[in-house]
Every structure is written in structure tokens, then in C-alpha cells.
Image: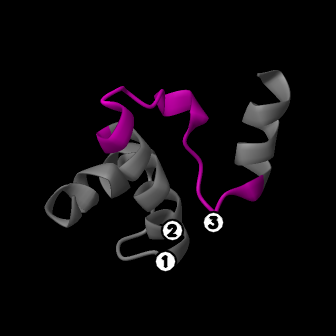
Amino acid sequence: MLSGYHKIELQFGIPRNDVGGAVAAFPAGSYMAYRDVDFPDQNFCHCGQPAKCHAGLAEA
């Protein structure tokens, strides 16, 4: 999981080694591994972009 994290940073525009992004990615990745399902990109947000995150949740 850690080896692929930098791909997630690039995909979602998370600053390199951003703690908030890692905190958000860990439970999403764990959920995907535990349930053997995909986690939709539009549901992923991180602590560094709260306004974007909340706007996306409001639309759901």
C-alpha cells in the first residue's frame, strides 16, 4: 500500500508526503482491501481540501 501512495498523490493532486492525504488514503485503501471492492474516486477527499470534500459530500 505504501509503495503505491505516490500514485495516489499524483492522481488527486495531493502535495508530496502530505499527512492529511495519507490519513485519508489509509482507511480508503484498507476498506478496499478488506471488502475487495473499489472506492469511487469522487468519494475520496483529504484533510488538505476540506471545501472540495464537503462540496462533494453535499452532492451525494
Residue at point 44%, 67% (across, down): 22
In the picture as drawn, the residue positioned furthest to the right comes out as 58
Instruction: Calculate the distance from the C-alpha at mark 3 to the C-alpha at mark 1.
Output: 9 Å
Amino acid carrying label 1: it is Val
What residue is disc 1 on?
19
Instruction: Calculate the distance from the C-alpha at mark 2 to the C-alpha at mark 1.
Output: 6 Å
Please say if the residues under marks 2 and 1 sit with CB atoms less than 8 Å apart.
yes
**Sequence-wise first label, 2 or 3:** 2
Residue 23's tag is: 2
Amino acid carrying label 2: it is Val
Residue at point 21%, 58% (across, down): 1
Could you say whether the residue bearing mark 3 is in a helix, strand or loop?
A: loop
Q: Nearer the viewer, mark 2 or mark 3?
A: 2
Query: Magenta region, mostly helix, strand or loop?
Result: loop
Side (left or right) of 6 relative to 55: left
**The residue stretch that appears in magenta:** 33-50
Magenta-colored stretch includes residue 38: yes
Give the quarter of the figure containing the C terminus.
Answer: top right
Q: Residues within 10 Å of mark 2 (few under 14, many from 20)?
A: few
41 over 54 or under it: above or below: above
What residue is disc 3 on?
48
